[in-house]
Image (cartoon, rainbow, N blue to C red):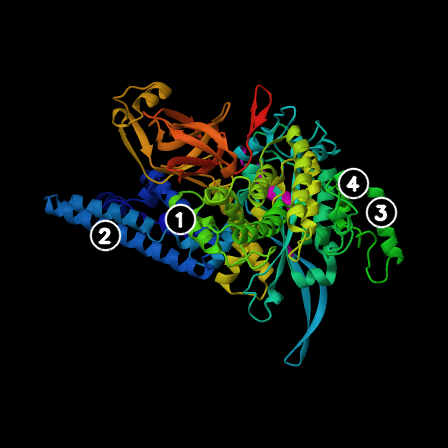
Amino acid sequence: MRHLNNYHSSDALLLCLPSESARTIAGSDTEEMVDETPIPLIHRPTGRQCVTDLQHEASTLVASLRANSSIPYCVIPEIIQSVDSMIDMTVHSLQSETVKLLRETGVGDDVVSQVDSALQRQVDTMSQPLQFLSTRYKQDQFFDSHTLAVKPQTIVLGKRYETRSGVTTPVYDTFQYISVEGTLRSLLSNHQYVKMLVQNDKCTPGVIADCWHGRLYKRHALLNDASKFCIAIQLFYDGMGTTNPLRGQSSMCNVGVFYFIVKNLPNVLNSCFANVHLVSLCYAHDLKTYGFKAVLNKFVQEMKHLAQNGFSGSFPGLPVSTVYVSLLQVACDNLALNSLLGFVECFSVDYFCTMCNASQAEIQCKFHENQFELRSVAKYNEDVKCVLSGNSSRNLAHSHGVKFDCVLNQIPGFHAVQNFSLDIMHIVLEGIVPVELSCILFYLCNEHDAVSVAEINSRVHGFWSAVNVEKCNKPPELNSVDKPGRLYPSMKAVQCWALLKYLPIILGDVVPVDDKHWLFLLHLSELVDLLFAPVVTTGMVAYLREFIADHLSMFLELYSGGENGIRLKPKHHLLTHLPTVILESGPLVGMSCLRYELKNSFFKRCAHIMCNFSNICKTLAYRHQQYALFSKLSNSHIRCSVTVGHSSVKPVCLCDCADALCSHFGIEETDNICVSNRVERGSMIYTLGHHVLIDIEEEPVFGKIELFVSLQSSDEWFIVVSCLRTADFITHFHSYSVEYITPKLYKVVPFDGLTDFHTLCCYKKVINEQTLTFVRLPYHIVSVEGGGPAGFV
């Protein structure tokens, strides 16, 4: 009615038409007015499209602001009001300037009046176009009604009573749950996402590239059914503090967070924040009070339904209409995994391992998995019955480490003892590497005058000042290593990894080649490279079993004796199971908690910014779903697109690599081409001077990035590299020695043509008065050619 009264009444029409038409209509009959009046300008397609485009940009702006964890929602209406005012002032200024210019050029008053009236109609149309998002309520209504939005549900755990100001009132303990089906439906509405799900059907014999190459996936009854389209998911749980842990009562706002990822996607895509989806948020003390069963019961019931009946719909690019979903595995840190699966949570006792019945004495002398009694479903069930019957030990309410029956065992195809998931981030980067690095540095500093903590800190600082990769992962200055087994200050996982990777280059020129501690450092470096390999072969797995046994033996031989003797940690024992985990579940990077731990930063930043803890779980869950909505709208979970910050157009002949460009694109030197010095793809930033791995022949082939180019008629970007000659792999520095080719040999490489997408560290070092250039690979990289494994480097 407002629309009809404003734009279809006789008075409104007189205001919306040119003056001459208005005078004509004023003296006519009402019926003739309706028949003869042209459509007002505000109803023209161009005017409507302009407002629609403006409102679309406004909704995109608000969605991006609501997705940002550093912006409180209370400031967004003020931003919208400011933008609205700027648009209003801009259109009024344009109107007045246009009329002024027409009058100055001598245009007649009648024409100026008509133009002014027409502009006024457009100004009225464009006035305050963002009012539909002017308040928090309007924004919530707009985005909550979006077809891709998945709202969190509040689930009641129980009721208790609290007395405040002498009045006793009931209080409901709740947690937030996000439907797995709702999330998947929203994701499957994107054609590109569906395409990524269905294209992973390549299988090279002897190569394990992802979970669908593992035994666990292949023997899963539902996932192995070729007649059904099935989605496998991986569940994650972790406890998270939302407030400063140094403040009093900080544990009151600690939460338990549950995520899941779609394992049908490659691991490189699942490392994206947008592809880590929220399942549930609950208070940590509610988990202790009610247990995992109460919190996960909703998830278990939904997964049982999705595994048996699936969900139906019309999905773009999907040949079937029914999608089935199953839980493949659970990935957590060691403490959370034991807690969730129902095993003992103390790692200083026997039977702490989720995969075998190892004792503390056995892990000090047995280094092969087949030397331990592995857990089985039948034995697990017996232990559960033993605990429930009360026949277990009085001091420890467990039987062989089993405390209770995991609620996730009710999901078809999943069992706690067949989980085959271990986290190399906590086991290796935050457990084994700090302990062994402290032992190595302690003895190197005590046995070699050229090595000291001060010298190490100086060299580390100089190294990170010279390299152009992993600048944000620079480790902190080390404190004096007073005894082996302790490395201070504590580091993040990525900092510890970076220190281990580059320490052979940093100290290699001052440590003798035959030093036993240095050889152990190189052994540790190779072990970590093998464990973090994104693609492995069955031969590598067999080699890794013996390599781990040798490593544990070397550690005990070097550091277990004397007054500073170090025993093997429980995390050392978990190394023996990693080869089996690879064979069952695929490469270990697919189970790493690093992506999940980074995701936690979103919630911590939100909690710090909003400072609203009345129902922290509900607030955080809602804000995360707003971020998830924006991710789907912006396609940030599709990581193949290249973002270019600044580009320019210039003739091919002005580029040093003109011959390579002409040969690759089939163009002339007089043609123009788009160039850039910096691009982003996924989470990786590429700039000039970075080094990349472009191929593996007899030796790896490295290239230095010289330019980013694209044809004017295409959106696809390419990398122009100058190739390097690989001289040799120098074991003492655990790096490749390379040489720059003169004159430069250019090569045009697509982003998908890179053998590995990471940028590499290239460092020049003077050794024996000779300058050598070293390139360090981040992990072992497998080269697969001709349909089979060609080896690894």
- Image coordinates of residue 317 in percent, x first then y, are 57, 29
Measuring 53% from the left and 61% from the top, which residue is drawn there? 607
- Highlighted range, magenta: 176-191
Q: CA distance from mark 4 to mark 1?
A: 46 Å
Residue at image mark 3 = 381
Above or below, 746 relative to 104: above
Q: Is residue 183 left or right of residue 21?
A: right
Q: Crowding at label 2, few (<14), some or many (≥20) Cα neighbours within 10 Å?
A: few
Eye-nearest disc, 4 or 3: 4
- Image coordinates of residue 17 in percent, x first then y, are 27, 45
Q: CA distance from mark 3 to mark 1?
A: 57 Å
| Tag 4 secondary structure | helix
Q: Nearer the viewer, residue 142 or 441?
A: 441
Measuring 56% from the left and 61% from the top, which residue is drawn there? 242
Q: Is residue 151 visible?
A: no
Residue at image mark 4 = 371
Residue at image mark 1 = 462
* Amino acid found under the numbered disc labelled 4: Gln
Q: Is residue 245 visible?
A: yes
Residue at image mark 2 = 93
